[in-house]
Amino acid sequence: MPLSGRVALVTGASQGIGRACAVKLVSAGAAVAVAARNQEKLTDLVSEITGTGGKAAAFTLDVSDEEQIKSVVKAAIADFGKIDILVNNAGITRDQLVMRMKRADWDAVLQTNLTSAYLCIQQVMGSMLKQRWGRIINIASVFGQMGQGGQANYASSKAGLIGLTMAVAREVGSRGITCNAVAPGFIETAMTAGLSEEFKQNAIKQIPLGRVGSPEDVASAVAFLASDEASYITGHVLNVNGGMLMG
């Protein structure tokens, strides 16, 4: 159990990549605080985890609300005693061509995908500094690295997340805290489920491994970065994209 005794907070944990990350971290021995807007799905996830002997607690959280972030982190630390691992996964899309994109849709995506990560990092930092050990893992995107038409807001938020990752890594490395990003490619989640079959097939043609990724593919990378095996890795962007983008 490489993460035995560790406590993780995962945002956007009710489904998709966040849910898979929570399950994977528990399987590695961690206790998890799962946070998202959908309380019903969180309750089901906690029941699944505790039913297999794991330890988890659910916290309703809209990461676009700074006060909710503060109260949830405080409650999670009160419940578990500390937070060792933070997985900033919560994210939304509001796709539109840049010339037609509404300012509200730009602001919503940046607030949810980027600003919330900064706020969560800020709130857990005291716990990590106290024990001089921490793992911050930000879920970025291949589109934050290569861009995507119709997603100026999303691509900007994910590129910003990569910059945030590197800045934080430099600030806290001397305190035994690492900060890394995982950049998924095309992953089969609720966010991609609505795409047409034609779009999916065209996307697969751009992936050397010839398949769409799974949430578990991303979760395995997150669990590795959270472990002591990755103790000399920080400020890094780990691509989980099937070869969609290389270099």
Image (cartoon, rainbow, N blue to C red):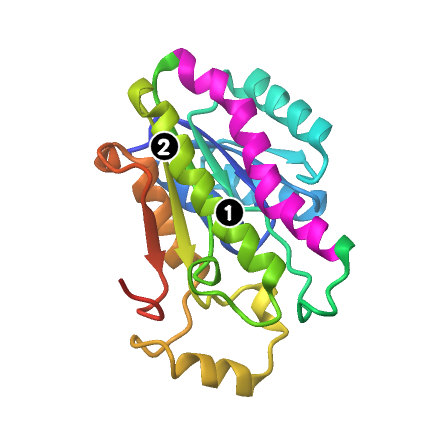
Q: What amino acid does circle 2 point to?
A: Ala
SS class, disc 1: helix
Q: Residue at x 69, y 61 (%)?
A: 94
* Residue 122 lies within the magenta run: yes
In the image, 22: left or right of 28? Answer: right
Which quadrant is the C terminus positioned in? Answer: bottom left
> Residue 20, labelled with which disc?
none
In the image, 106: left or right of 211? Answer: right
Relative image position of residue 63 (x, y in whole percent): 66, 39
In the image, 106: left or right of 52? Answer: right
What residue would you read off at disc 2?
169
User: Hey, which quadrant is residue 123 in on the image?
Assistant: top right
Residue closer to the observer: 4 or 132: 132
What residue would you read off at disc 1?
160
User: Hey, which quadrant is residue 73 in on the image?
Assistant: top right
Relative image position of residue 35 (x, y in whole percent): 61, 38
Q: What amino acid does circle 1 point to?
A: Gly
Mark 2 or 1 closer to N-term? 1
Residue 211 visible in the shown view: yes
Numbered disc total: 2
Circles 2 and 1: CB atoms closer than 8 Å: no
Please state the extent of the stretch shown in magenta in the rendering: 105-130
Relative vertical location of residue 121 with respect to residue 181 in this rendering, above or below: above
